Every structure is written in structure tokens, then in C-alpha cells.
């Protein structure tokens, strides 16, 4: 056994299919994506932009009391005894999350030109970016918040041809965990699910899964793209630091979208609350186009 996860084991780890060199070759990039259901794009987002967002998130982590005193903030070293995960019932976590959702630079990561070009190639047409951007903060010894094997489609609905970009907000070496993906699993369609026996998210794949997965260290600016049917799971954070990441989703402009994908994540705020300090002419203020096919 090479690596243990929240709900299953991996006995063989392969690198992610790398589409970085194919961003300017959309047909070849689409073929790679269609084959594997997952594509790694290195330097998809300006590293400086990601690091700036990381600093903003860490400032809010410090305000929340999550960082160890006397340590460089850039190390994201967690305070002793702190368990950090997506806990809407925790007022400290909720305040942290609301403050993150108000950050325009966080939402702007989704509009990075290379990232958008890669997704246009994969999707084969004009891209629509979901508005529901998700920030993740996972502390050490927080296995309870490591997501079990699942498919995003269970949660997002709409068109199956939705692609998630998992974006590490800071370098993500082996000790921080990150995301492992089951390549080719998108070809199996929607899989049966059951209530999860542990980890975050509440649901897991019901049935046996292969033990050969893809994973590799990622750096600020990288984006791991995968189809809504592609099975993936979190890896436990075994470091002493907080792991920060983002989930951002994309689809063809002409395909249907579920209404929830246009809302603030967890409905923790309204969009007017989020954008209260954004410039009036900011293009990120634009709501969904009138002809977007919205489903309830």
C-alpha cells in the first residue's frame, strides 16, 4: 500500500495526464480529456495572482486564530489543537468563509486566460464559468474533512459536461495531500452512491473501486481539471500546515445549468453582500446572461 485516504487505499500512483503543452492545440487537448476525464494544466493561472490570494486567505486564518504564533505566516503552520474544515455550524469558520467570498481576487482566478483557453479546448466551444466558487481550508489531523471517493455531478447537476478546476492556493507537496483522481472513471456514467462512513461531503461511491489512481505534487498556478463524472477523493493532510485550495467549475455556454451553481457557495452570503466593495463597472459583477438555460 502506497498511500491511504479517507475511505479507500491506493496501491499504485500514476502522474496526471498532462495537457500543458496542448493548450494551443484544442483538438489534441480534447482527445486527452475525453480519454482520461482528467487533465493537468501547469501554470494555468499566474503564480503571483495565486500567491496574492493565498496571502489574503492566510491573513484571515490568522484573524481566526488558526495559525501558530511565532511562525512565518507564509508557512501556514497551524496552531496546536486546531481542527479546520468546512464547518458551517462553527461561527469562526463561517466568518472566515464569508470574508474569503468577498475577495474579488479569489473569484478572478477563474478568469485566467490560459485556464479559460484550456477549458474552451476541452469543451469545444464558448465557456461559461459557474459563479459558485469554493474555497477549502484543511488543517493537519483533519481526516474528518477529507472527501471520500465521489463524483461532482451528484452535487452540481446541470450538464454532465461540467469540468471542475481544482486549484491549489499554494504549493501542494505530498505531505499536504491534495486530490487523487481515478482516470477513465467518467466513462462509467453516474455511479451508485451511499451515505459516507467518514470524511466530508456526506456521500461516497457505493462499490469497489480500482486502486490505481493519479496524483502528483502541484504548485501555485497549476490547475487540475476533471469531468463531473470523474471519481476523485481527497488525500489526508499529514503536514503541520493548513492546505488551501479552490474548486471552480466550467461548462459550455449553450448547455443547461442548475440554479444553485449561480449562487454563493453554501448560500453563506448574497451576491450583493459579496460585491459590496467591488467597482460598479467590474465585469465580475455581471450576472448570468438572459438566455442561459437555468434548471431548478
Image (cartoon, rainbow, N blue to C red):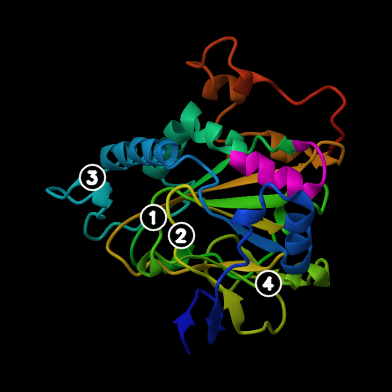
Q: Measure how far apart labels 3 and 2 are at the Cα level.
A: 20 Å
Residue of label 4:
183
Asked which quadrant contains residue 62, the reply is top left
Please tell me which residue lies in front, 46 or 208: 46
Residue of label 2:
218
- C-beta proximity under 8 Å, tags 2 and 1: yes
Mark nearer the viewer, 1 or 3 = 1
Which residue range is magenta in the image? 114-127
Residue of label 1:
171
Q: Residue furthest left?
A: 70
Residue 249 point in image, percent of width and height: 66, 45
Mark 4 is surrounded, within 10 Å at the Cα level, by few (under 14), some (14 to 19) or many (20 or more) other residues, namely many
Dot 1 or dot 3, earlier in sequence: 3
SS majority, magenta? helix
Mark 1 is surrounded, within 10 Å at the Cα level, by few (under 14), some (14 to 19) or many (20 or more) other residues, namely some
Dot 1 or dot 4, earlier in sequence: 1
Dot 4 or dot 3, earlier in sequence: 3
Q: Residue furthest bottom?
A: 1
Q: Is residue 62 shown left or right of residue 287?
A: left
Residue at image point 52% right, 12% down = 279
Reply above or below: 142 against 188.
above
Residue of label 3:
73
Residue 174 point in image, percent of width and height: 39, 69
Residue 131 in the magenta stretch? The answer is no
Residue at image point 55% right, 72% down = 15
Amino acid at each position: 500500500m502506497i498511500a491511504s485516504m479517507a475511505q479507500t487505499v491506493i496501491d499504485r500512483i500514476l502522474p496526471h495526464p498532462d495537457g500543458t503543452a496542448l493548450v494551443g492545440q484544442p483538438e489534441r487537448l480534447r482527445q486527452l480529456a475525453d480519454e482520461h476525464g482528467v487533465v493537468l494544466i501547469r501554470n494555468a493561472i499566474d503564480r503571483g495572482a495565486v500567491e496574492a490570494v493565498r496571502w489574503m486567505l492566510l491573513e484571515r486564518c490568522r484573524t481566526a486564530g488558526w495559525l501558530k504564533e511565532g511562525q512565518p505566516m507564509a508557512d501556514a503552520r497551524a496552531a496546536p489543537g486546531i481542527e479546520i474544515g468546512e464547518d458551517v455550524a462553527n461561527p469562526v469558520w463561517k466568518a472566515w468563509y464569508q470574508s474569503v467570498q468577498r475577495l474579488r481576487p479569489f473569484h478572478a482566478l477563474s478568469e485566467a486566460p490560459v485556464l479559460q483557453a484550456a477549458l474552451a479546448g476541452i469543451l469545444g466551444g464558448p465557456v461559461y464559468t459557474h459563479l459558485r466558487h469554493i474555497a477549502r481550508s484543511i488543517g493537519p489531523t483533519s481526516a474528518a474533512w477529507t472527501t471520500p471517493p465521489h463524483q461532482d455531478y451528484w452535487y452540481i447537476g446541470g450538464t454532465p459536461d461540467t469540468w471542475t478546476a481544482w486549484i491549489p492556493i499554494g504549493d501542494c507537496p505530498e505531505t499536504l495531500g491534495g486530490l487523487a483522481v481515478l482516470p477513465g472513471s467518467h466513462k462509467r456514467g453516474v455511479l451508485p452512491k451511499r451515505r459516507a462512513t467518514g470524511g466530508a461531503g456526506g456521500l461516497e461511491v457505493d462499490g469497489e473501486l480500482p486502486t490505481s489512481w493519479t496524483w502528483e505534487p502541484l504548485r501555485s498556478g497549476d490547475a487540475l481539471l476533471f469531468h463531473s463524472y470523474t471519481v476523485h477523493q481527497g488525500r489526508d493532510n499529514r503536514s503541520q500546515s493548513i492546505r488551501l485550495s479552490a474548486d471552480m467549475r466550467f461548462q459550455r455556454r449553450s448547455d443547461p445549468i442548475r440554479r444553485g451553481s449561480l449562487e454563493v457557495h453554501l448560500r453563506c452570503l448574497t451576491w450583493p453582500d459579496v460585491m459590496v466593495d467591488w467597482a460598479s463597472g467590474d465585469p465580475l459583477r455581471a450576472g448570468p446572461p438572459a438566455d442561459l438555460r437555468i434548471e431548478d
